[in-house]
Image: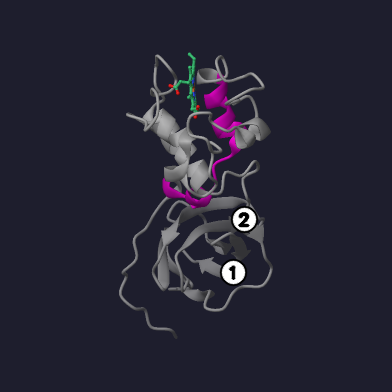
Amino acid sequence: MKTLTPLTVLLYFSFFGADTFAQVDYEKDIQPIFDASCVSCHGSTSGVNLANYDAVMNSVGDQYGTEIVVPGNPNQSPLVDKIEPSPEIGSRMPQGGPFLSNDEIDLIRNWIAEGANEVAVSNEMISEVPEGFEMIDNYPNPFNPQTIISFTSPVTSAYNLNVYNATGVLIREFSGVTNNPKTQVQVNMNDLPSGIYIYRVKITSGNRSFFLESQKMTLTK
Ligand code: HEC
């Protein structure tokens, strides 16, 4: 039987999930900001044109003399300088206001920091589990009504832990971000009948996702 190390791990629930790692999506998140606040003045073919992705990426500011988006570098991008207070050159955009909200400015900053991609780079699903990631048998097992499900993750990772009943119906969902070598999630099944349950952990680390081996556990009331 495995011995348990002290419960050191924070529990997170679905409000702090794996989408912490999701990238900003240009069409969904960025173009609508330009459409609402910029294209009325920057929709033509000359100068700064913010009507679509290609136009944005090819726009060269007359005054700055450079392309307005520098992928990976929001601080060097005239586009960011112009929407924040006190730009280096000229007036803050949108000219005459109302200015963008801090959330909108952050989205634009993040989109550029992530590489200013047209399509959000999605996580690649891989079938081989990288070294150091491993399920640990839940403890206790059989259990009533609580058990602890654990896994190891050598680097900061987002996880989703799903518990299914024997017919495959999803009955519990946990998710979070962990930088703990051993993550422990406490699961309480006091509202459920005795029986066999199956659980599976999905990990997202860097831009890779993979499943750890699924396991069975028995609730005995
Ligand atoms: C009401 C018209 C108007 C709106 C709306 C507007 N702009 Fe501008 N924009 C201008 C004018 C005029 C200039 C040139 C004068 C200046 O830079 O202050 C300019 C200049 C710029 C430049 C610098 C170009 C250069 O010459 O280097 C950028 C970048 C820019 N705007 C981005 C934006 C963004 C992003 C938005 C929306 C959030 C926006 N603008 C909304 C009128 C507008």
Q: Is residue 196 left or right of residue 167?
A: left
Establish whether ligand 1 lies closer than 8 Å to the Cβ of label 1.
Answer: no
Question: In this view of the protein, which residue sits in the foreground, 147 or 55?
Answer: 55
- Crowdedness near tag 1: few (<14), some (14–19) or many (≥20) residues, C-alpha within 10 Å: many
- Residue 89 position in % (x across, y down): 39, 29
Say whether marks 2 and 1 touch (CB < 8 Å).
no
The stretch in magenta equals 15-35
Residue 66 vertical position relative to residue 220 in the rendered view, above or below: above
Q: Which of the two discs, 2 and 1, labels the residue nearer the N terminus?
A: 2
- Residue 76 position in % (x across, y down): 45, 44
Residue 59 vertical position relative to residue 4 in the rendered view, above or below: above
Q: Is residue 177 left or right of residue 39?
A: left
Question: In this view of the protein, which residue sits in the foreground, 112 or 146?
Answer: 112
Residue for badge 1: 212
| Residue at left offset 42%, top offset 48% | 16
Numbered badge on residue 123: 2
Q: Based on the displayed image, in which of its 4 quarters is residue 188 positioned?
A: bottom left
Q: How many marks?
A: 2
Q: Amino acid at mark 1?
A: Leu
Q: Quadrant of the N terminus?
A: bottom left
Q: Amino acid at mark 2?
A: Asn
Between the C-alphas of marks 2 and 1, the distance is: 16 Å
Residue 31 vertical position relative to residue 200 in the rendered view, above or below: above
